[in-house]
Image: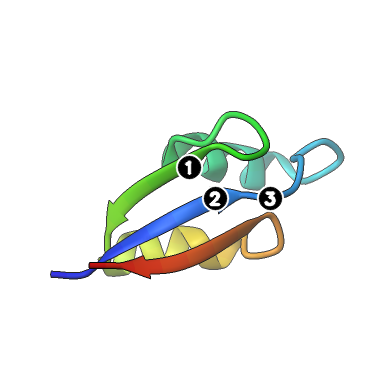
Amino acid sequence: MSRLKITQTKSYIGSKQNHRDTLRSLGLKRVNDVVVKEDRPEFRGMVHTVRHLVTVEEVD
C-alpha cells in the first residue's frame, strides 16, 4: 500500500478553526513538520481540506 508524505508549508495563523483542527488531527503542529500516513480516503479528505497549507508526496 502506498503512503503519503504530508508537509506543512504554511502557517495556520489567520485560517479557520476547522483548518487548524484538521492540521492537528494529521499530526502537524508547525511549519515544516512532516508526517507519513497511509494513502486512505480519510487522510485524502483531510489533506483536501487544508490543501493550501500543505504539500503532499507519494512515498513507497
- Say which label, 1 or 3, has the lower sequence index: 3
**Residue at left offset 58%, top offset 62%:** 55
Residue placed under numbered mark 2 in the picture? 7
Quadrant where the image shows the N terminus: bottom left
Tell me, yes or no, whether the two marked residues, 3 and 2, touch with CB atoms within 8 Å. yes
The residue carrying mark 3 is 9
Pick the residue in front: 18 or 31.
Answer: 31
In the image, what residue type sits under mark 2?
Thr
Identify the image quadrant of residue 14.
Answer: top right
Compared to residue 4, the image places residue 13 above or below, namely: above
User: Is the C-beta separation of discs 2 and 1 under 8 Å?
Assistant: yes
Q: Residue at x 35, y 62 (%)?
A: 4
Whole-percent x and y of residue 60?
22, 67
The secondary element bearing badge 2 is classed as strand
Residue 1, compared with residue 38, is above or below; it is below
Cα gap from disc 1 to disc 3, whole angstroms: 9 Å
Is residue 13 depicted above or below 5 in this figure?
above
Callout 2: few (<14), some (14-19), or many (20+) C-alpha neighbours within 10 Å? some
The location of residue 49, given as percent across then percent down, is 58, 62
The residue that appears at 34% across and 49% down in the rendered structure is 36
The residue sitting at the top extreme is 29
Along the line of sight, which residue is nearer the eye, 40 or 18?
Answer: 40
Report the front residue among 60 and 39: 60
Helix or strand or loop: what does disc 3 sit on?
loop
Residue designated by label 1? 34
The crowding category of the residue bearing disc 3, from other C-alpha atoms within 10 Å (few below 14, some 14 to 19, many at least 20), is some
Query: What amino acid is at disc 1?
Result: Val
